[in-house]
């Protein structure tokens, strides 16, 4: 008996439901009615695709959708297994049908479109943009936490200042001043990592239904924040040297565009850093139209090559720039400590929005962070981490040059965790993702970094969780897959994207 026999084969535009979603819904229905139980193995992707007469990528996307919802568990080399469903609340008349907000529905649809990386938990993690836990300075931070309790006692177990622990704000202000940005602790509002900072900054300038300009490709959680707040995105294309300034000029000239979100240093996903001239022209365009700029400096401390360039906030003379900071990538994400840096009335408004969101961050962790930085332990950790990242980046660039076919291009970052790689025409990295997963390699396909999930030749490779040996092996496998999809057998050198 066929595994699925109710697949609607109408034209998708006529039927209104993508084929992958039909497949996922059919499987979900069989689980709900008890035909499939926890632990049951789903058919292999190739087998089900042949049965239904669809592309393997369609079935793969359906399985990824179910995995993202926690319904199935995919394991490399073993298959995809049913995990089951959470019980639904019910009344005597049946399950409740509660209306959700349009923003929530839109956000859930966007989240389902993202890749479910849990399927490749044993694969080489080129997708992971988070620090390697094996190098966390656990002992040093524990000592700082102990000193914080010794010095402040029960005081740090209270709510504390809604603006955040003043000692940590002073530390951040000192570091910013060294980099040429003259602000005091009164201009800094602590928050739960840069992600909360993005939401606060967006709410500072835009209401529900307003429009904010963003780079494209860009950080996918920034797109998530826009959708969650009901804010429309006005994408501005990225080039090798940064956002297209002519396109930015035209976009910011539009009256409905309220602000611009940008990552000028170690861009996510591209890894690029803009020049001083580019930054000055960007600020001139923003000032021409009086449009504020949200500068995401989440990897600011991770430079391992090249010369530092003043931040947009440091160059800003018009009071238009709000800056986002974080310890999540440079130290560890578990402290959930970020900051929004703003001046004057903007800082007051950010504090009001922050206070409305919650009553403040974890005071013990903020006090420990302040001690960790002041003790010199943070800078020692950064020096070690940046040496490690430079070594990994160099190995990755060498491997790309050796293994990827002609027509492949990539960026050469001066810091941070990510390298952007563009495949030869006409390879779509959404399809390549499934092949790479089968080969034991996880990548971040480019469609995730666009607001419309468009087809993309790009993918992000991260060196955060991969050592040199894993990098070489992973790129070797990727190179073979790309040559196969491109119909090439040669191993000729690709080309760096010049910035």
Image (spheres, helix red, strand yellow):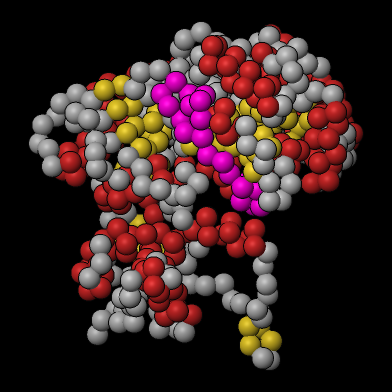
Task: Identify the image quadrant of the N terminus.
Answer: bottom left
Quadrant location of residue 462?
A: top left
In this image, 142 relative to 448: left or right?
right
345, above or below 46, in the image: above
The answer to whether one can see residue 145 in this image is no
Q: Residue at x 26, y 49 (%)?
A: 435
Residue 97: percent from left, percent from top:
65, 78
Location of residue 381 in the rendering, given as x and y in whole percent from the top left corner:
57, 19
Q: Residue furthest left?
A: 489
Asked if 305 appears above or below 440 in the picture, the reply is above
- The answer to if 297 sits in the magenta stretch is no
The location of residue 439, given as percent across then percent down, is 25, 47
Quadrant where the image shows the C terminus: top left
| Res 442 quadrant in image | top left
Q: Is residue 397 left or right of residue 18?
A: left
Left or right: residue 430 compared with residue 326: left
In percent of the image, x 38 and y 20: which residue is there?
A: 412
Q: Residue at x 33, y 71 (%)?
A: 11
Tell me what residue is drawn at x 75 percent, y 12 percent.
182
Q: Position of residue 51 (x, y in %)?
A: 22, 74
* Residue 178 shows up from this direction: yes
Magenta residues (range): 226-247
Circle count: 0
* Name of the residue lying farthest toward the bottom: 92
- Taking depth in this image into account, of 462 and 345 the one nearest to the observer is 345
């Amino acid at each position: 008996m066929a595994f699925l026999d109710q697949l609607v084969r109408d034209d998708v535009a006529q039927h209104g439901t993508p084929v992958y979603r039909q497949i996922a819904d059919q499987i979900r229905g069989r689980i709900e009615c008890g035909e499939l139980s926890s632990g049951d193995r789903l058919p292999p992707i190739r087998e089900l695709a042949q049965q239904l007469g669809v592309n393997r990528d369609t079935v793969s996307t359906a399985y990824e959708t179910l995995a993202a919802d926690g319904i199935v568990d995919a394991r490399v080399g073993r298959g995809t297994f049913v995990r089951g469903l959470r019980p639904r609340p019910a009344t005597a008349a049946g399950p409740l049908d509660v209306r959700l907000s349009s923003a929530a529905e839109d956000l859930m649809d966007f989240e389902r479109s993202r890749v479910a990386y849990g399927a490749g938990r044993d694969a080489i993690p080129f997708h992971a943009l988070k620090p390697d836990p094996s190098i966390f300075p656990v002992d040093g931070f524990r000592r700082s936490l102990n000193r914080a309790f010794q010095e402040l006692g029960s005081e740090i177990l209270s709510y504390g200042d809604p603006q955040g622990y003043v000692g940590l704000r002073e530390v951040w202000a000192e570091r910013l001043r060294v980099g040429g940005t003259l602000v005091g602790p009164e201009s800094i509002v602590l928050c739960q990592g840069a992600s909360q900072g993005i939401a606060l900054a967006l709410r500072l300038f835009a209401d529900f239904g307003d429009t904010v300009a963003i780079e494209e490709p860009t950080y996918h959680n920034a797109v998530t924040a826009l959708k969650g707040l009901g804010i429309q995105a006005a994408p501005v294309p990225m080039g090798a040297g940064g956002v297209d300034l002519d396109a930015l000029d035209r976009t910011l000239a539009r009256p409905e565009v309220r602000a611009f979100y940008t990552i000028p240093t170690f861009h996510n996903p591209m890894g690029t850093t803009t020049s001083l001239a580019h930054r000055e022209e960007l600020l001139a365009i923003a000032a021409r139209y009086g449009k504020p700029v949200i500068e995401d400096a989440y990897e600011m401390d991770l430079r391992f090559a090249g010369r530092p360039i003043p931040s947009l906030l440091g160059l800003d003379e018009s009071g238009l720039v709000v800056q986002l900071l974080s310890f999540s990538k440079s130290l560890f994400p578990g402290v959930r400590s970020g900051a929004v840096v703003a001046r004057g009335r903007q800082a007051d408004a950010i504090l009001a929005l922050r206070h409305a969101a919650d009553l403040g961050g974890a005071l013990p962790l903020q006090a420990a962070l302040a001690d960790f930085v002041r003790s010199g332990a943070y800078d020692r950790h950064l020096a070690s981490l940046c040496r490690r990242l430079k070594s990994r980046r160099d190995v990755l660039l060498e491997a790309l040059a050796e293994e990827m076919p002609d027509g492949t291009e990539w960026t050469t970052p001066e810091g941070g965790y990510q390298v952007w790689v563009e495949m030869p025409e006409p390879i779509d990295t959404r399809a390549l993702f499934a092949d790479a997963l089968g080969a034991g390699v996880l990548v971040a396909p480019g469609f995730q970094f666009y607001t419309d999930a468009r087809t993309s030749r790009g993918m992000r490779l991260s060196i955060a969780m991969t050592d040199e040996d894993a990098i070489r092996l992973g790129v070797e496998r990727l190179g073979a897959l790309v040559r196969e999809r491109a119909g090439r057998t040669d191993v000729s050198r690709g080309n760096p994207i010049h910035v």
